[in-house]
Image (tube, rainbow, N blue to C red):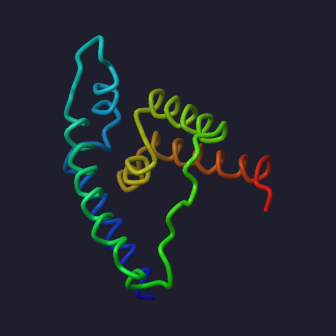
Amino acid sequence: MKQNLVALLCGLIFGMGLSLSHMINPNKVLGFLDMTGNWDPSLLFVMMGALAVAFISFKIILKRPAPLLTESFHVSKKSAVDKPLLLGAAIFGIGWGLSGYCPGPAVAGLGLLSLESVIMVAAIYLGFFTYNRLFDKK
């Protein structure tokens, strides 16, 4: 129960950050991707801030023997760049470029009852389902 409350709080803070920075507006994101037109660099500053916080946080947190609310850290042990990673990154990039949404802002946009967000989140789950049906070897 405590994990779920902390996850909800983190999600709310993340969503508020996306909203305050206007990153739930696909036109803002598409403006960043339009480098030959009216380029909007604000997403770059949001990304740099997020990377700085994540870099410092990971350096500190991963020195702990275990997280506070679970038995172990869930960090990928994979370090190789392989075909599935490149294919997934390409599909992610194409979807982001076509819609203006990446997963976080798409989910945050659900709170605004945005049809585009609903379509994007449905497409994300369709991708999960397709991957699990076709490629998951568990």
Viewer-closest of 19 and 3: 3
Q: Quick one: which residue is furthest to the bottom in this view?
A: 1
Residue 5, compared with residue 21, is above or below; it is below
Quick check: 90 above or below 16? above
Q: Quadrant of residue 55?
A: bottom left
Which residue is pictured at 63% across the width and 39% down the height?
A: 82
Question: Along the horizontal axis of the image, is 94 left or right of 135?
Answer: left
Q: Quadrant of the N terminus?
A: bottom left
In the orientation shown, which residue stands out farthest toward the top? 36
- Work out whether residue 11 or residue 86 is closer to the camera in this orientation and state it: 86
- 96 with respect to 27 (left or right): right
Tell me residue 68's x, y (percent): 37, 85
Residue positioned 40% across, 51% down in the render: 104
The mark total stands at 0
Give percent across and percent down for residue 76: 54, 60
Q: Quadrant of the C terminus?
A: bottom right
Find residue 44 and report its horizontal and vertical position in percent: 24, 35
Q: Is residue 129 left or right of residue 25?
A: right
Can you say whether 71 is above or below 50 in the image? below
| Residue drawn at the location 23% of the way across and 57% of the way down | 53
Q: Is residue 70 above or below residue 57?
A: below
The structure residue drawn at horizontal position 50% and vertical position 85%, both measured from the top left corner, is 71
